[in-house]
Amino acid sequence: MKADLIFQKYNEIKNNINLLKEKYNLNYDIEIVAVSKYSSLETIKEFLSLNLDLPLAESKAQSLRDRVGEFKDFKNIKWHFIGRIQSNKVKYIVKFADLIQSVDSIEIAEIINKEAEKNNKIQNILLQFNISNESQKGGFNLTDYKKVYQNILNLKNIKIKGLMGVASNSDDSNLIENEFESLNKIYNDINLEFDKNKVSILSIGMTSDYHLAIKLGANMIRIGSGLLVNS
Ligand SMILES: *Cc1c(COP(=O)(O)O)cnc(C)c1O
């Protein structure tokens, strides 16, 4: 049964998280986001039958819309959006996402704000930073964090919950750790500087690097291939 396999993967990840929490003496929760972007509807159904109560994440606006519709009978699913945001798709994303993790420009934030206002909603977001400095990846420049944060704070229908980053796709764990560390530093700096508008989510780490992310302060990890297996 596929659900059994998913449950086994989930337990391995939970065990690893607990071991890492002990190893690094961490006393806060680390939330797993189940990235469903590669998964068939069948796999997602099996996953939902386990009632693990994890948020699901999609990276395309159309898939988000379609899948929210597909699973509307399952109450209380939280949906995250983690992909590049095109301005003409913002309406679907704001309508269906509990948390948009991939806000990476002021212009997009302004469009989200307008759309949220129309929907009578406060949209929770994370600011995505380009920690790997790869031009094909999304994300704000690390150096602009203060200006970006201050600007987006002024948007009334947006609530900035935290920061998100995607590390280089590399075997070099030092490189990946440095990238995670750079975002951890900004996370701490923001919370010192904007002490009335603190953030609480540091979303770093995926299947291949979540152990490094947890070492560097992740309290949210986004797991796709390591959890929602299709076969
Ligand atoms: C696809 C994706 C993930 C999950 O990747 P896996 O390596 O399958 O765990 C996490 N975060 C983002 C932003 C993604 O696009």
Image (spheres, rainbow, N blue to C red):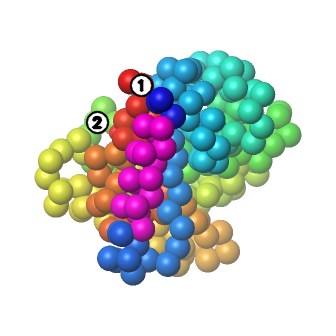
- Characterize the local packing of mark 1: few (<14), some (14-19) or many (20 or more) Cα atoms within 10 angstroms: some
Q: Mark 1 and mark 2: span between their CA atoms?
A: 31 Å
Q: Is any atom of residue 87 visible in this view? A: no
Q: Quadrant of the C terminus?
A: top left
- Label at residue 230: 1
In front of the other: label 1 or label 2?
1
Image side of residue 16 versus residue 45, left or right: left
Residue 29 in the image: state x and y as whole percent: 54, 67
Q: Examine the image and state in which quarter residue 227 appears.
A: top left
The residue nearer to you, when weighing 51 against 156, is 51
- In the rendered image, which residue does mark 2 sit on? 135
Residue 12 in the image: state x and y as whole percent: 38, 53
Query: Which element is circle 1 on?
Result: loop
Query: Which element is circle 2 on?
Result: loop
The residue nearer to you, when weighing 84 against 52, is 52
Q: Earlier in the sequence, mark 1 or mark 2?
A: 2
What residue do we see at 61% from left, 77% from top? 195
Number of marks present in the image shown: 2
Magenta stretch, main secondary structure, is helix
- Label at residue 154: none
Tell me: residue 196, above or below residue 199.
below
Image side of residue 170 versus residue 66, left or right: left
Q: Examine the image and state in which quarter residue 199 appears.
A: bottom right
Instruction: Tell me which amino acid carries mark 2.
Output: Ser
- Residue at the extreme left: 172
* Magenta segment boundaries in residue numbering: 4-18
What residue do we see at 28% from left, 46% from top? 208
Residue 126 in the image: state x and y as whole percent: 55, 51
What residue do we see at 25% from left, 61% from top? 177
